[in-house]
Amino acid sequence: MIDGKSRRPVFVEVFFNILGSIRQPLLVLDYDLNVVKANRHYYLKFVSEPTETEGKSLFELGSQSWNIPKLKESLEAVLLDNAVMNDFVVEQDFECIGRRIMHLNASRVLYRKSAVSQLILLSIEDVTDNELHKRNLEELVQQRTVDCVSAQEEADKRRQAAEDALAEIQSLKEQLEAERAYLQEEIKLENNHERIVGQSDGLKYVLYKVEQIASSDTTVLILGETGTGKELVARAIHDLSLRKNKALVKVNCAALPANLIESELFGHEKGAFTGSHAKHIGRFEVANGGTFFLDEIGELPLELQGKLLRVLQDGEFERLGSTHTIKVDTRIIAATNRNLEEEVRKGRFREDLWYRLNIFPITMPPLRDRQDDIPLLVEFYVGKIAKRMGKTIEVIPTGVMDALQHYHWPGNIRELENVLERAVINSSGPKLRLADELKKPSKELCTISKTLAAVERDYILQVLEQTRWKISGKSSAAEILGLDRSTLRARMSKLNIQKF
């Protein structure tokens, strides 16, 4: 059935009437994409009139024109190939309603077989609010993701910083525990830090050199006979240095067995050798930031001298059983009663280590060259020993002082202290009485041609014979010489002293 007026089928007119009842903007387009009809909601949405729309191209609608080139291509494809256009989203500025986001969908309507009689139903949905909300959500999610990543990175940094701080705290704790253990051992050996006593020119020169070098980190080598007070000089250097608030750690290289000295100096890991059931921090780590005093450096085994040289040069080493390099900042003070140059010539001491140690040598004069200091030393030690024993010594006879001043003192100040302790014990009243018969040195002892080792050997033999070869205990050779029992045995072995 055909409507004569419009020459269009009746169902098309019915179709147009139905469009008016749909609450969504709709357009009916002809084959040339001109607007045939628009429903009421289209005009309300785009604020326009039928006279501004019907009969005009979709792309020439004035204020509501669609200026999306791809839209034309999509609509033409609906006419030629497809029954329905895939969803199409456009975003553009409209003169009356501003910038909007529209969701379009088109379908082909055929009311005659002729191609030019085909229509397109174009539905329009304003999805601006939803799209903007969706975009805001996406931006929010994206921002939250960035924030989460940043927060995770910050958390990782803080966790790493916390782990690093914890590791540093653990390292400092281990060092402090080792330092405390070491200092407790030191307290057992010495109740008070003794001061250097004397006014002789030789001692004044030593003190001048101490003040000269104390404030730097230069390695110091203290030379002198056994018992001259080399450790006191090392303590004086440390106490006047910028490291005075840190520990002064000491090791006597002659007092430790060769198989343990490496572990004592550099430490070891658990299981590094048989019997090492726990990690042990070496003295160099304990001395980090402070001063390390290596007494009797000439006794250090040759195989360890290279490791010590590395610490002196680079400030680093490895514990036994570990490949991890440890850095330390410590000042080295070494002491010896040996002639290290002679030891180098004999191949018993590394020449490069000798050069690294011999930067600033200080030689302690023997007590026999400090006769003017003996009265001061006697007064100091007698007062100290008497106080410890609960005695009062008020008088030191002239004859006693003369005997003390004219004795050769091969054991130096250590021997003097031992002699004075026995004298205090021997004194029942306020007057000091010597328990030892101090003889002037024999001609043989004063022979200039004798080496220091020969003189030392003769004196040890003399003391051993005097004590009937009693090495340890009360009134023993070790006590008279002021040496540890193990040190005396080591010296006897080195000097080939045997009882026949």
Image (cartoon, grey):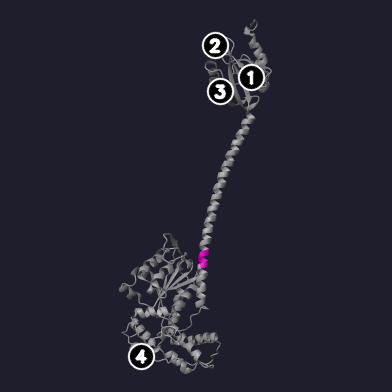
Q: Mark 2 belongs to which amino acid?
A: Ala
Q: Which residue is mark 1?
A: 26
Classify mark 3: residues with Cα within 10 Å, few (<14), some (14-19) or many (20+): some
Quadrant of the rendered image containing residue 82: top right
Q: Mark 3 belongs to which amino acid?
A: Asn
- Quarter of the image for the N terminus: give it: top right
In primary-sequence order, the first of circles 3 and 1 is 1
Tag count? 4
Q: Which residue is mark 3?
A: 86
As drawn, 305 above or below 478: above
Q: Residue at x 55, y 52 (%)?
A: 158
In primary-sequence order, the first of circles 2 and 4 is 2
Q: Which residue is mark 2?
A: 115
Q: Residue at x 65, y 26 (%)?
A: 97
How far is the residue under mark 3 from the one under mark 1? 16 Å
Residue 248 in view here: yes
Q: What is the span of residues highlighted in magenta in the rendered image? A: 173-177
